[in-house]
Image (cartoon, rainbow, N blue to C red):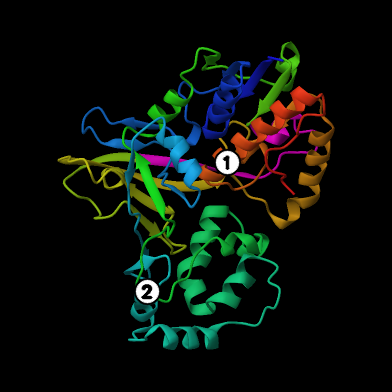
Amino acid sequence: MNQSILVVGAGFSGAVIARELANNGHQVTICDARSNVGGNCHTERDKQSGVMVHRYGPHIFHTTDTEIWEYVSQFTTMKPYRHSVRTTVQSSVYSLPINLQTINQFFGKTFNSDEARAFLADQCEDFQAPQNFEQAALASIGRPLYEAFFRGYTIKQWGCDPTEIPAQVFARLPVRFNYDDRYFDHRLVGIPADGYTALIQNILDHPQIDLQLNTTCTAQDISDYDHCFWTGTIDSYFNFIHGRLGYRTLSFEMARKAGDWQGCAVMNYGDISAPYTRVTEHKHLAPWEDHNETVISIETSKACGPTDTPYYPTRKLSERDQLKSYVDMAKAAPNVTFAGRLGTYRYLNMDTCIRAAIDIVAAYCSAVTSGSPSPNFATDPL
């Protein structure tokens, strides 16, 4: 039974949901408040330099899921890419993630792997079950590395003390005891040759998909459709009845420079005294291209206000009860499925968003065929 479906949000999650629904014979309208598809993955060429700019910060596609890599490769040429990050702290430049080079340089040592492990073990503090970001860091790498590389950066990025952030956030940050300075050690790492926006435009190129940009949708707009997939913020769907959940937004100061500005794609600034979190030099995100000029963006994080664009959820420990209230409402809401980073209030990588989108459409189509209830979430926020 073919249905008329509304998808709100034309980022990765919304685009893949729309495509999979269309492939299954449904008529899909997808809307986005912005003038372009791609959400925060939006890329565009700088007209003067020709550099492909990641307009809302650098996005690197990395996964261990071969099927997801093959899925996106249907719609673009994925160029292999090795992401290497540097950080400026205490007037020195170090390699991230923390690895054997970082440890030896910071402490002025020449440790081998086992010696470095033993040394850091002596630095670590005893938290058997870390309850927050700071405790997780202190239990893993000790206070000197935490204070230098993570405390100031985390305060700037999240706008709160690290003791307010869940321990799981630190668990996403690798620590290596070899000289591997790849930020992602997944087997499949790349960037679309023509940028993410072109990739998502190709995903949405289907006769049963009606794309409507510069279009804002609310919960009231779904009544004309059999079902809605909502990838906007979960609290906005319910008109903030339980208050606004915490999100961070970003601002970017763009500038053109001559030649090579910083010698790497991303330079973090860990010191609390530096007002920005990182600087991206975009041409290094496409090393297969050659440009005489370069484009940099200086990135600053702040709390997301009512008129700002949300980038990622804070998921503070203090927000758990508030989030549960919204999740309970979402599970009871008819004819709507919440998906994506904003719709499920989770920090999700691109490959995870795509996998969840494919799986939720499969579950929805099965439910339609069998007459069973449709799923409410692509990924349960709790």
Q: What residue is drawn where x is 54% and y is 88%?
A: 122
Question: Above or below — where is 59 with respect to 318?
Answer: above
| Residue type beneath disc 2 | Thr
Quadrant (top left/top right/bottom left/bottom right) for the N terminus: top right
Question: Above or below — where is 340 with respect to 225?
Answer: below
Q: What residue is drawn where x is 65% and y is 59%?
A: 165
Alpha-carbon neighbours of circle 2 within 10 Å: few (<14), some, or many (≥20)?
Answer: many
SS at badge 1: helix
Q: Earlier in the sequence, mark 2 or mark 1?
A: 2
Q: Residue 357: x and y, percent?
A: 60, 35
Q: What residue is drawn where x is 73% and y is 22%?
A: 219
Q: Residue 185: x and y, percent?
A: 42, 60
Q: Residue 59: x and y, percent?
A: 42, 44
Q: Disc 1 designates what residue?
A: 355
| Residue type beneath disc 1 | Arg
**Viewer-closest of 291 and 207:** 207
SS at badge 2: helix
Is residue 372 among what the camera can see? yes
Occupied quadrant, residue 140: bottom right
Q: Residue 78: x and y, percent?
A: 35, 40
Residue bounds of the magenta highlight: 232-253
Occupied quadrant, residue 184: bottom left
Q: Disc 2 designates what residue?
A: 102
In magenta stretch: residue 255? no
Q: Residue furthest front?
A: 370
Q: What residue is drawn where x is 73% and y is 11%?
A: 224
Residue 273 numbered tag: none
